[in-house]
Amino acid sequence: MKTVQTINDLTNFLECNKGKTIGFVPTMGYLHEGHLALLNMAREENEIVVASIFVNPAQFGPNEDLDRYPRDLERDTMLAAKAGVDALFVPTAKDMYPFESGITINAGELSNKLCGESRPGHFDGVLKVITKLFHLVQPTKAYFGQKDAQQLAIIETFVSAYNFPVQIIRVSTVRENDGLAKSSRNVFLSDSERIEAVHLYEALSIATETWKKTKDVNEAIAKGKSHIEQNTSGRIDYFDVLTYPNLKANIENAEQLLFATAVFFEKARLIDNIIVEVKEV
Amino acid sequence: MKTVQTINDLTNFLECNKGKTIGFVPTMGYLHEGHLALLNMAREENEIVVASIFVNPAQFGPNEDLDRYPRDLERDTMLAAKAGVDALFVPTAKDMYPFESGITINAGELSNKLCGESRPGHFDGVLKVITKLFHLVQPTKAYFGQKDAQQLAIIETFVSAYNFPVQIIRVSTVRENDGLAKSSRNVFLSDSERIEAVHLYEALSIATETWKKTKDVNEAIAKGKSHIEQNTSGRIDYFDVLTYPNLKANIENAEQLLFATAVFFEKARLIDNIIVEVKEV
C-alpha cells in the first residue's frame, strides 16, 4: 500500500493506474469495522482501491468536535493495508483548501432536517469535500455506509443531479454484538452510556415493527422515543420517519422509509437508522 | 460529425472514444466567429472535439431574453461540422434538468459585481450547467472566450477550487473589422446602434491607455465612460476596473487587470473587456 500525502502524489499514483476501475472509500479515519466493510466491498469490486483519511474542517461547526475528533493514523494505515487498499490518501487541510474561492455548494432542503437541523452547514461541507475528492480520485464506484443515512441520501441525490461519473454504493451498517452501530464516536461513551446505547437500535426496531403493523407513523415515532427516554440517560435530538432518499415527511407513495434517530450523550452524539422497503411490507 | 441529443447517446459516443484527449466547447448556439475560434483551437489541440448547444434556462433571470435568445440549429450544425467537431451535443432542458434536487452552487462574491450585479443568479446557473457538462463530457481541455471575462474568471476559480480534472483554455475575443466584439446578441442592434457599438471597445482602449500612462484608475474609468456617453445612445450598466481573476476593486499587487463594460441598447445589452498584464506595463 502506498500512502500519498499530497494531491501531486495522488495524481502520479492514478496516472500509473490509468484505465483500471477504481473503488473509493472516503473516511475521516479512526477506522472501525464499518469502514472495513466498505474497504472489503471496494476490494472485491474494483481493480484499484483508494481510501482517504481527512478530518474535513468544512463539515464541522464552530462548536463541534473537530479538534477532539479521534485520530490514529498508525493504526489506520495498518488496517487499510490489511484490507487491501492500494493508495491511502491523507492530505492536509492546506492541500485540500489552499484558498477560499467564495464559491459554495448548498445542500438545500435535504439538509434542513435530521442531523442537518442541529449541524447547520455540515452537509454543505460534506458536499464540498466530496466534490473535490471525486474530482481528484475519479473513482468508478464510491462506498458509503448506511449509518450516515442523510449523508448517503444527499450524496446520492447530488451525484444524480450533477451527473458525477461515479456509482454510489450503499453499504449496510456494521453493528456490535449487542446491536450498537459501529462509530468512531463510540469511544466517547462512558461505561454506563455504552450499555444504554444499544437502545437506539432497539427503539428503531420497535418503531419499524410498530409501523409495519399499524401503518401509523406517529405511533411508531412515539414508541421509539419513549423506549429511548425510558432506557437511556441521553437526550433525543430527533427521532423521525421520512421518505428515502428524498427525506420528505409526507410518506405517501414512498418506496423506502428512513427511520432515524440521534441522541446526545455526555460526550458523544450518536446516530442510527433503519431503512424499510415499503413494497416488501 | 455525430449529433447526439440525449445523455445516453453522448455516453455511448464517449465510450467508443475512451482514452482519447477531448476538447470541449460548451455554447448556447447561434455560432459566430468567436465560437469558431474556440472550435478551431479545440480541433488543433485534441483527438476528439465535443461541442454542446444548450440555451441553459438556469442562467437566465425571469425578465431576461431566454425565449428570444437567437437559435439556428441547422446553420450551427453545418458550422460545427465544418469546424471539425466530432460530436455535437444538443440536449433538451428536460434531459439536463430531469428533477430539482434543491442542491445549489453559489458563485458567491465573484458574482456580485460587473454582469452579476444586474443578473442575479446568472453565474449560479452557469456553474450548475458547467458542472453537469464537465461531468458528462469529462474533457481534457475546455475552451471559453475572453469576451465573457467574468464567466471565465468564475469558471477558472471554480475549476481550481473544486479540482475539476480539466484544463480551462482562455481564447481571445474575436472582433468585427471595426472592433466590435462578436456576439450572438449583435443581431438585436438597430443599424445606428450597430455603428455606435464600436465605441465600447474604443472606450476600453482609451481607459487602458489612460491607466498605462497615469496609473489612475478613476481617471481611466471616467474617460472610458465619457467616451461611451458621448458616442452612443446606450445606457452604461457598468464600466469598471478589477483584478483578474479575483475580481477585486483593490488593484494593489494585481498581475492582471480587467477593464470591462456593459451597455444597454434598445434590444440588446452588450459587453466587452480588455485584460492588461500589469507586469508588462
Image (tube, coloured by chain):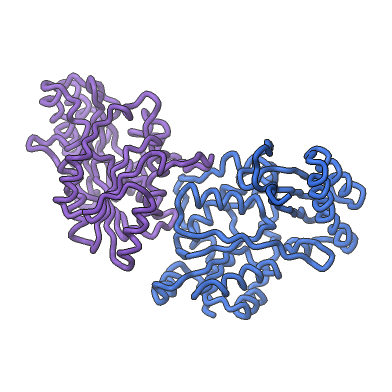
Chain colours: A purple, B blue
**Residue A234 at x, y percent in the picture:** 21, 21
Q: Is residue B267 above or below residue A197?
A: below
* Residue positioned 40% across, 38% down in the render: A111
- The residue lying toward the viewer, choosing from B14 and A100, is A100
Q: Is residue A21 above or below residue B106?
A: below
Q: Looking at this rendering, what residue extends furthest in the left direction?
A: A177
* Residue positioned 37% across, 57% down in the render: A11
Q: Is residue A261 above or below residue B91?
A: above
Q: Is residue B117 left or right of residue A228?
A: right
Q: Looking at this rendering, what residue extends furthest in the front direction?
A: B280
Can residue A169 be seen by looking at this rendering? no
Q: Is residue B56 left or right of residue A97?
A: right
Write down the quadrant of residue B148 in the picture: bottom right
Write down the quadrant of residue A252 in the picture: top left
**Residue A232 at x, y percent in the picture:** 16, 22
Image quadrant in which the N terminus of chain A is located: bottom left
- The residue lying toward the viewer, choosing from B201 and A219, is B201
Count of numbered labels shown in the rendering:
0
* Residue positioned 82% across, 43% down in the render: B220
**Residue A101 at x, y percent in the picture:** 53, 42
Q: Is residue A63 left or right of residue A204?
A: right
Q: Looking at this rendering, what residue extends furthest in the right direction?
A: B230
Can residue B7 be seen by looking at this rendering? yes
**Residue B85 at x, y percent in the picture:** 56, 76
Q: Is residue A128 above or below residue B273?
A: above
Write down the quadrant of residue A228 in the picture: top left
* Residue positioned 81% across, 47% down in the render: B207
- The residue lying toward the viewer, choosing from B27 and B46, is B46
